[in-house]
Image (cartoon, grey):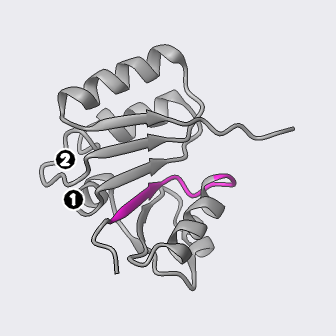
Amino acid sequence: MSDLVIGFVGLGNIGAPMARNMAVKHAGGIVAFDLDDRAFAALDGTLARRADSVAELAAQADIVFLSLPGSAQVEAVCLGVDGLASAAARRVHTVVDLSTTTVASARHVGAALAEAGIAIAGAPVARTV
């Protein structure tokens, strides 16, 4: 069993299959958060644990993957009150942003996370139409 705890925020059409795959393949499972309670159905039968807030997820996860609709949501999750950067009991040290965001937002979030001692990697995933 791995000591690394993976967090996943955003269990929508793109994020849910990724989170499920991680939860099934990672020996320690994952901890996940989504605003929509129905989104957790995609993780049934896995080792996924549910966080009730971003702050709770930040206290448990070492690395956090984000799969969010856009820049505003990424900024809220990373920089908002009780977000990844400001969570009082923060464990997270790395964020992998799979969201498609603006360059300005990515730079802003990256700089703020760096100030908080959190590394970020941008790895946007785009859906095909």
The answer to if 9 sits in the magenta stretch is yes
**Residue at image point 55% right, 46% down:** 67
Determine whether 38 is above or below 75 in the image: below
Determine whether 61 is above or below 65 in the image: below
- Relative placement, left or right, of 14 versus 37 is right
Q: Are marks 2 and 1 in contact (CB under 8 Å)?
A: yes
Q: Looking at the image, which residue sits at the far bottom?
A: 45
Q: Looking at the image, which residue sits at the far right?
A: 129
Callout 2: few (<14), some (14-19), or many (20+) C-alpha neighbours within 10 Å?
Answer: many
Pointer 1 residue: 59
Q: Looking at the image, which residue sits at the far top?
A: 104
- Expressed as whole percent of the image width and height from the top left, the position of residue 37 reads 52, 66
- Picture disc at residue 87: 2
- Expressed as whole percent of the image width and height from the top left, the position of residue 103 reads 51, 16
User: What amino acid is found at the position of numbered circle 1 in the picture?
Assistant: Ala
Q: Of residues 66 and 79, which is closer to you in this image? A: 66
**Sequence-first tag of 2 and 1:** 1
